Amino acid sequence: MTLIPCYACESRFRPEEYFLACHDYNRGMDLVAWTCPRCGNRDDLRVLPDAIGFGYPRRGRFAVQDSFRVPGLRRHRQDLRLDISLNKEVWRVSTRLRQLS
Ligand SMILES: [Zn+2]
């Protein structure tokens, strides 16, 4: 089974643990935030077919620099959430709604 690492503390997570820690889907930048359950490090990542992409925001976009292979990983973009699926499991990552002023 694929174990996915936290690049800050090098803990490795089973996919269900890892994707549960995703939050705040940003549809414009097409990324989700991830907070490590062990060390609290926050990372931005993009869910790709068969991989997780890591990178950084640049000129209003998210530039993927590195990727980590997760065979079978799939994504489905919704209006206010991203559905991440792997095998038969689905994790729904909502967009955090900001108050309009
Ligand atoms: Zn960590």
Image: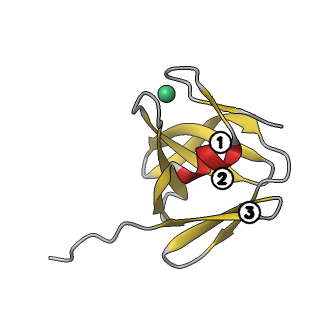
> Which quadrant of the figure contains the N terminus?
top right
Q: Of helix, strand and loop, which one carries label 3?
A: strand
The amino acid type of the residue labelled 3 equals Glu
> Contact (CB < 8 A) between labels 2 and 1?
yes
Mark 2–mark 3 Cα distance, whole angstroms, equals 15 Å
The earlier-in-sequence mark between 2 and 1 is 2
Mark 1–mark 3 Cα distance, whole angstroms, equals 20 Å
Please state if 93 lies on the left or on the right of 3 as rendered.
left
**How far across and how far down the image is residue 70, in percent?**
78, 43
Q: Which mark is residue 22?
A: none
Mark 2–mark 1 Cα distance, whole angstroms, equals 6 Å
Mark 2 crowd level (few <14, some 14–19, many ≥20, 10 Å Cα): many
Mark 3 crowd level (few <14, some 14–19, many ≥20, 10 Å Cα): few
The amino acid type of the residue labelled 1 equals Gly
The earlier-in-sequence mark between 2 and 3 is 2
The earlier-in-sequence mark between 1 and 3 is 1
Please state if 95 lies on the left or on the right of 101 as rendered.
right
Toward which corner of the image does residue 18 lie, by quadrant? top right
**How far across and how far down the image is residue 5, in percent?**
63, 29
Badge 3 is on which residue?
89
Badge 1 is on which residue?
53
